[in-house]
Image: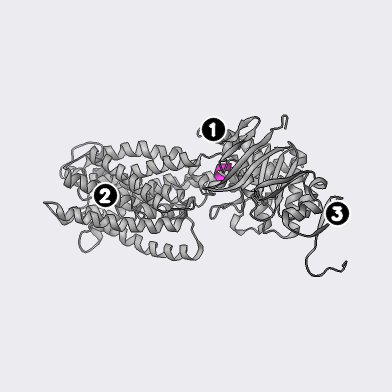
Amino acid sequence: MTKSLDHTIQQVRTTRQLRSKKWTTIVVILCLLLATVFMVTLSMGQSFTPPNQVLQVLLGKNVPSASFTVGHLRLPRAVISMLVGMSFGMAGVAFQIMLRNPLASPDIIGVSSGASAAAVFAIIMLNMNGSSVAFFSIMTGLLVALAVYALSFRHGGVTGTRLILVGIGVSAMIESVIVYLLSQAQSWDRQEAMRWLTGSVNSAQLDQAYPLLLSLCIFGGLLLSRARELDALRMGDDTAQALGIRIGLTRITVMVSAVGLIAVSVAITGPIAFVAFLSGPIAMRLIKNNGSLIVPAGLVGACLVMVGDYIGQFLLPSRYPVGVVTGALGAPYLIYLIIRVNQKGNAL
Amino acid sequence: MTQKHQLIVDSLSAGYGDKTILEDITLNITPGQITSIIGANACGKSTLLRTMSRLLAPSKGQVLLDGKSIHQRSTRQLAQILGLLPQSPTAPEGITVGDLVSRGRYPHQGFLSRWSKADDDAVAKALDTTHTTELLEKDVDELSGGQRQRVWIAMALAQETDILLLDEPTNFLDVAHQIEVLDLLVDLNQSRGTTIVLVLHDLNLAARYSDKLIAMQQGRVFAYGTAHEVITEATVQTVFGLNNQIVSDPISGSPMVLPIGRHKNTTL
């Protein structure tokens, strides 16, 4: 009996270690992929810059012509894309896990468009800039998230489908507000409109990286500190609570940090379509149940935005903002999910 | 188990919204025993269990664990003493048995304290006790109903609590699997001294497997005591509105209810 128990203990330990090894492997691969994508987007554009010159520019050396193309044109785009993608990916998967539904990502239930509308309003109507825009959009994002949650509340609980339908409705309403605000702007231009409706990194500047980094540290860190609790929520509120998870506190922390990540990013690049929505499920396919999805989803999000922007810039007949590309990728998946959710209820 | 924890329900009322379901319930759960809650549908059995496990806040009265209200204790600390298996819990899609059972260790791990030897031991013991070791790497989705129920119980066991509450653990199981689950609970009660409170539908199994029975009727405790005290013709008649005859269970000696309907009665 004790011998067989020892054997079981050994087995339990081995499978656990195997799971964490699988998680680490996938995360390392994703990091390498991200680094590769980063290098490729820096060296290949209208012209080719050899990787060694790219490295020299990154190290701060002055390389004729490369310093301009890499340092001024490509680097800001790449850095902003990466940070924004990471924020969207982490926030998206947090919402999806918390609400136990892949459709519940912030870009589908109106949080992103809410933050976007707030940014447009703050910039165009109130002439605000910088951190006050970000703050305004975080508050609005939170407000929209709470409103969608409250509107979906029935009989002491929120059901996934109801929340999503309410969210899609709210999202549509807010997008019309964005269009209206843009039409009131004095210097109406298409670039700007595209940015606030589908997201674009065309106006990326390197100093925008600081607020993004700060938000990733604060909100991303907060989210990671709740990773275990978030994971427990996947077993339903009752079981999670029985396991000693403080449901209310976890929900609020996750919601605030996810909305924070979204809003700060949206204030800079606009709501890049479907990145938050796609990253989680892709990370899920890769990681399976071998560990937390937050970091992997962030890495997937970063890759998605960088690759999407590269495709939009160089691989299509004319130049498109990144949101158009990710939107085209996300829409078919959205349709697939709606059909699937209809058939078998919700799942991530 | 060196010191047994004491669970007391003190003039408790609870409900959902304005609807009161439980009214003025007072109970003293005997430590180290198996107690089953029985009663007709919608009499408040599950609500009582949910309130006792702090999933539902009482509107009046309180649930005391060692003299302190469970709603005032830290959730995590409470989860180390009192475990709960909800009715039809949800497993995340694609989760393996090993992973699910490991989650029972949540309350014993902190943000910084990593997985320890004690955690591996507890998970292994839980798998061993529930005979689910060979399922370790299987997907929970692939299991049969009986296996799945054993795996959920294993998760609750891995939590290593002195008190375990189970909401209809034999629901949707065939009779062989029902017996298997109940035997398992008795094993647990005998080997670890775990105090077990469960909601059961089958009166005869409840009478056979429990040390104490709580018979509920319309949100109140109608009778509380041993099977011989609670399972009487009068009680079953009142609580379930069922004509019946009580005989002695030839297997266990516990009282056994024979229902009497309008048909198929040859004793008239």
Query: Is B258 above or below relative to B15?
Result: below
Q: Is the residue marked by circle 2 packed among few (<14), some (14-19), or many (20+) residues within 10 Å?
A: many
The reply to whether the C-beta atoms of the residues labelled 2 and 3 are less than 8 Å apart is no
Query: Is A227 above or below relative to A331?
Result: above
**For residue B249, which numbered disc appears in the image?**
3
- Identify the residue at horizontal 50%, vertical 52% (top origin): A288
- Identify the residue at horizontal 23%, vertical 52% (top origin): A196
Amino acid residing under circle 3: Asp
| Dot in front, 2 or 3 | 3
Q: Is the residue marked by circle 3 packed among few (<14), some (14-19), or many (20+) residues within 10 Å?
A: some
Q: What element carries label 1?
A: loop
Determine if the magenta segment contains residue A241: yes
The residue to which callout 2 is attached is A116
The residue to which callout 1 is attached is B113
Determine if the magenta segment contains residue B34: no
x and y percent of residue B241 in the render? 73, 58
State which region is magenta.
Answer: A239-243
Q: Label 3 marks which chain's residue?
A: B
Q: What element carries label 3?
A: loop
